[in-house]
Amino acid sequence: MKWTSWAFLAFVGFLLFLVLFIADRQMKARAGEDRLSRMKVLPQSALEADPNLKLVSERSPYMRTER
């Protein structure tokens, strides 16, 4: 075989490898998305985070002194 035919076979092999590599990466990325979509997170109130948390409104004395 001539060098041009070997170069052509190498080029086709490289393209095939590239296509398969990209397809594999996309399949792995989709599997990660599916795993994330199956996760269940229970809703939590922000008020339950700290028992010493105080509610502050515009009319509270705390906010009037901060202005």
Image: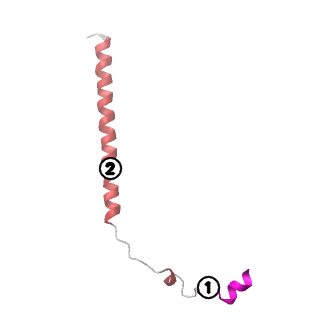
Q: Does the magenta run of residues contain 60?
A: yes
- The picture places residue 53, in percent across and down from the top left corner, at 58, 85
Instruction: State which quadrant residue 13 falls in.
Output: top left
Instruction: State which quadrant residue 6 falls in.
Output: top left
In the foreground, 47 or 58: 58
Q: Check if mark 1's residue and mark 2's residue have beta carbons within 8 Å.
A: no
Is disc 1 placed on a helix, strand or loop? loop
The residue that mark 1 highlights is 57
Q: Residues within 10 Å of mark 2 (few under 14, many from 20)?
A: few
The amino acid at mark 2 is Lys
Work out which residue is located at the far bottom of the displayed protein and give it.
61
The amino acid at mark 1 is Ser
Going 58% across and 86% down the picture, which residue do you hit? 55
Quarter that holds the C terminus: bottom right
Quarter that holds the N terminus: top left
Q: Which stretch appears magenta?
A: 55-67
Q: Which of pointers 1 and 2 lies earlier in the amino acid sequence?
A: 2
Going 74% across and 85% down the picture, which residue do you hit? 65
User: In the drawing, what numbered circle is on residue 28?
Assistant: 2
